[in-house]
Image (tube, helix red, strand yellow):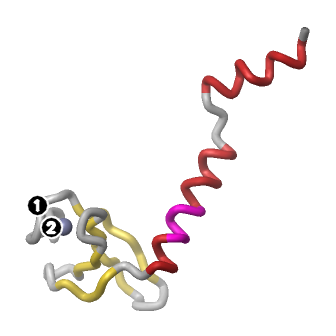
Amino acid sequence: MPLFCKQCNSRRLPEHHEAEKQTMWLCKKCKNFADMDDVILREQTDKERDEVRRKQEEFEKTTPLSNEKRVRRKGVN
Ligand SMILES: [Zn+2]
C-alpha cells in the first residue's frame, strides 16, 4: 500500500475517483496521486484542489463549532 509518499515520506490519503474508476492515494504535500502500486499517476488539478477546499468550507459551515455557540447566545439577551 502506498501509504507513505516516496518523495517526501508524508502520509498519503486514499481517495476514490469515479473518473479513473480506482482509488488513488493523494499526497497533500506533493499534490500528486499514486495508484495501488505506488506509481505516481498525475498531479492534483486546480479544480480538484478547489473542490477539496469547497467541501472543507461546507463541512465547517454545517458543523457547529464551540465558538459558534457563543456567537449565537448574543441573540438571547
Ligand atoms: Zn509527497
Horizontal and vertical percent for residue 50?
A: 53, 70
Residue type at mark 2: give it. Cys
Q: From the viewer's perspective, tell me whether residue 31 is left or right of residue 15.
A: left
The one nearer the camera, 61 or 2, is 61
Horizontal and vertical percent for residue 16?
A: 41, 75
The one nearer the camera, 12 or 31, is 31
Residue 9: numbered disc: 1
Residue 52 shown in magenta: yes
Query: Where, by quadrant of the figure, is residue 63 drawn?
Result: top right
| Quarter of the image that includes the C terminus | top right
Q: Which residue is mark 2?
A: 5
Residue 67 shown in magenta: no
The one nearer the camera, 33 or 30, is 30
From the Cβ of disc 1, is ligand 1 less than 8 Å away? yes
Kind of element beneath mark 1: loop
Residues in magenta, as a range: 50-54
User: Contact (CB < 8 A) between labels 2 and 1?
Assistant: yes
Rendered residue at 61%/24% (across/down): 66
Q: Residue furthest top?
A: 77
